[in-house]
Amino acid sequence: MRYLDPVALAKLRSLRLSPRRMTAEGHLPGRHRSSARGISHEFAQHRAYVPGDEIKAIDWKVFARQERFYVRQYQSENILTGMVLLDASGSMAYAAGGRPAKWENACRLAMAVSFLVLAEGDSVGLATFDARPREFVPPRASFGQLEVLDSALDRCRPEGETDLAAALEAAAARIRRRSLVVLISDLLGDCEAMLKVIKALQARRHELMVLQVLDPAERDFGFEGPTVFRGLEDRRELFCDASSLQEAYREAFSRQQRLYEAGFHGADISFLSFFSDRPWEDDLARLLGRGAP
Amino acid sequence: MTFSDPAVLWALPLGAVPLLLHLLSRRRALQVEFSDLSLLRRVQAQALPRTRLRQWLLAGARCAAVTLLIAAYAGPVLEPQAAVPEDPAGAAGPGGGMDLVLLVDRSYSMGVVSQGRTRAAAAREAAAGLLRSLRPYDRVACAAFAEGVETAGPRLDWMTPRACQELIDRSPPGWGATDYGPALRAAYALLVNSRRDRAVLLLSDGAAHGLRADMPPPEPGTGLYCLSWPPPPFNAAVLSARPERAGGTGSSAADQPALRVRLWASADAGSALDLWQERARLGASSVALRGQGETATSLSLPAPTSVKASPDDARGVGAPAPTWSGRVELRPDALPADDACYYSFRHPRRPRLLVLYGDPAFLRSPHAGYFLHDLFAGGGRRLLGWDADFAESDRLSWSGSRLADYDAVALAEPQSLSASAAAALEAYVRQGGGLWLQPPGRGEAAALKVLSRWLPVQVSAAAEPELVQGLRVGPGGPFSSWREFELDKVTLTRRLDLAPRPGGRVWVRAPSGAALLATAGYGAGRVAVWAAPLDAVSGNLPVKPVFAALVSASLSLLREPPARSRSSRRRWASPSSGPGRARRRRRRGCGCAPRRGASPPSGSRTGGWRSPRPADPAST
């Protein structure tokens, strides 16, 4: 696999991805508790008998004490569905200073999260998008899914503009059950709109984890003098005196990051920024170690 | 506002250069790809108005700085729009202020020292004070002049007072004469369009001859002012110091050198005139100078014997040509630059003749020496332009004699010649000398027998006595016509027979055709033989006017170049080599006798003018 080499696998084996509060939905039994009542060894509650309930579910000991029919219900346990939403817009192809492109890091992160989800016995799928959904791999609970995901990422190339709101709307429409949604993107664009869309996605009772992939040059903005910037998404040019805008850009970027952190923290969404100049495995371990799902 | 140098304002478009650089800087912008420009656009949108304002303010400030710099270089001069109450001159002039043109004289006379400083320095100080007193709205122009006009630019134009002062400071008095015309014309041309108060100030010494031609009057309202000077101090000048030529032909300028000095003075006065020879002051003489006119005087220079020998003398080539150099100097006065005049000249040396005689009574009458001595040096005159020394042949040490110091040797009336004397004479003639033989008074040829071995003219006693009545002179020679010499009245009672060998020539004959004067070449020299004695006993030739002409002609014949025919050279030339050949070449080149660095028997040195004669083809 291109994006998941044995070294990375060895590092990921010590990590576990466990949702903090979510309950799984579905029909397949798994390790995650479900909100539904089903067949398991763990007693959930008694419920008054209603016509139609199975007779064998009546708790006869309770009837002997209270002379009323009660039915015993047990906690259901299902597998978790993980969905990796990967931003494949043109800005993800950015690379500077000889460092790997953001797309490279994002793919590795997607494969690592997928591996962690599969390692828990859950299913994982993939959806890439730019301004609209592009690639969709339905979730499966098999390690063979890693090969499928790797080949899907290999086929995909970052290009085009980003419309995260529309793309997440379309992706959410294809995720019917409550799932673990891992959004991997650079989150460059309209900060307020993105927060709004992400919170709307959370309102559908999905467990969300946002991984922001950035290049240090986007944070430091170390350009000097008159510069013509050419955007990787819209291919338009912008001429400015980089020296005069340096401080203002850094301040705006910092303000944007603080807004993301505050927004995600308030919505109890796991969020971490991954920069290309640091090993992504360490950042991921730090994220999972502090109680990420 | 006006500008002192408005031409500089043509550079004002350069003020837009910073703006062009600002606009062109976009072409040099770095091209960079960036991930997402939305944040950058927002940042720029917020900062753009402020950034743009700052950039345009910066570009504007740069343009303004360049423009102001150019304007400052053009020399702005503020002037009021109307009469200013604080400006009393503004109320008088229609435009306010004054236009002043300074004309600085840098002629030679401005170097006169008066009251401890030159007139140029006084004019400079006056100009400095005037320039300091100018008001900001006054305009000033300045030019220096002598015989022409010198301006700071291509033409006379308004300047800053500082530029005027710099021009005046770098205009010291030169060597030119004074001419006000061009400077005044330039000043009037500059002021012709001025509507302000106008003035032209001549910083000159007011030389009366400064205006060489009629000048048009200036425009009405233009004032012409000059500086006033104290009365001019006394000044005298040495105009020239040239060697004075001798008046008569017999006296030599080299013997009595003198300088003719021309002096000029501004007023009648007496002055001391110092004569310097090299670095030594020979003396001083008092001269009465005539005011506003020339005064000439003569100064005697030392005789050539006391003059230092020339470098040629040190090499031993021959007697040097006497030279004199030094200066004539007046005592310093108001203008010390013209108080000295330097001189340097040289007198060519005269040809020299050594007259050798055998009879001690040769110099007494009626012997020929009496007439020859009178001809060459009698009474302090030199009729023939030769310097002659007389010596008795018997007393002469032939081995140590320096015959080569003479251009010709006259052997007159020899009685007996020794073999060494004959050998010395032969060597002398062979090496380029001239020998003039005069037979003894008795007309005997025996005395010349010792010379017959090499003499190119065969001399023998006449077969029978013959009275020669009259002379016939052949063509050529120094004189073109002999008619006025009364050749027919010459009488000779004794003579010898002359037979020149091939290559020789008979120049004077008797009416019978007998040769009286024959010449022939021998080696590099020539020999002339006169057939008859030159005393007054053997004829009347010494007392005839033709005597001096014949002597002169004979000496001239001796100085002719030797024969060039191959036959004569093959027959008469001796097998000499080395120095003799070199001496022949030198003698052919300059036409003079061989010389050596030695003193003649008399120990005196003489000099004179010598005119080299061209080679006469007929004599060969």
Image (cartoon, helix red, strand yellow):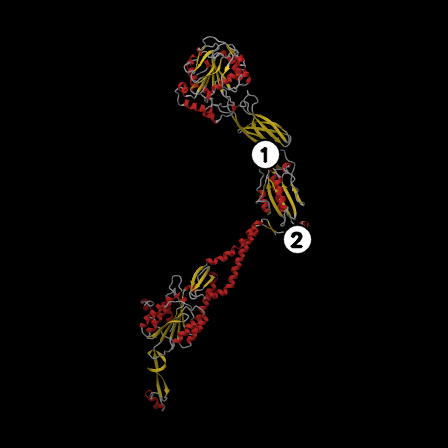
Q: Nearer the viewer, mark 1 or mark 2?
A: 2
Q: Position of residue A30 (x, y in %)?
A: 33, 78
**Where residue B467 appears, x then y in whole percent?**
50, 9
Between A113 and B516, the one nearer to me in the picture: B516
Q: Chain of mark 2?
A: B
Q: Residues within 10 Å of mark 2 (few under 14, many from 20)?
A: few
Residue B82 — which label?
A: 2
* Residue extending farthest front: B512
Do residues under tags 1 and 2 come within 8 Å of each other at their CB atoms? Answer: no
User: To which chain does the residue with label 1 belong?
Assistant: B
Residue located beneath label 1 in the image? B336
Amino acid type at image mark 1: Pro
**Residue B37, image x, y percentages:** 45, 65
Answer whether residue B598 is visible to the viewer in this image. Answer: no
Return the mark for residue B267: none
Element type at marker 2?
loop
Residue B567, image quadrant? top left
Q: Nearer the viewer, residue B471 or A215?
A: B471
* Whole-number angstrom distance, CA of label 1 to CA of label 2: 53 Å
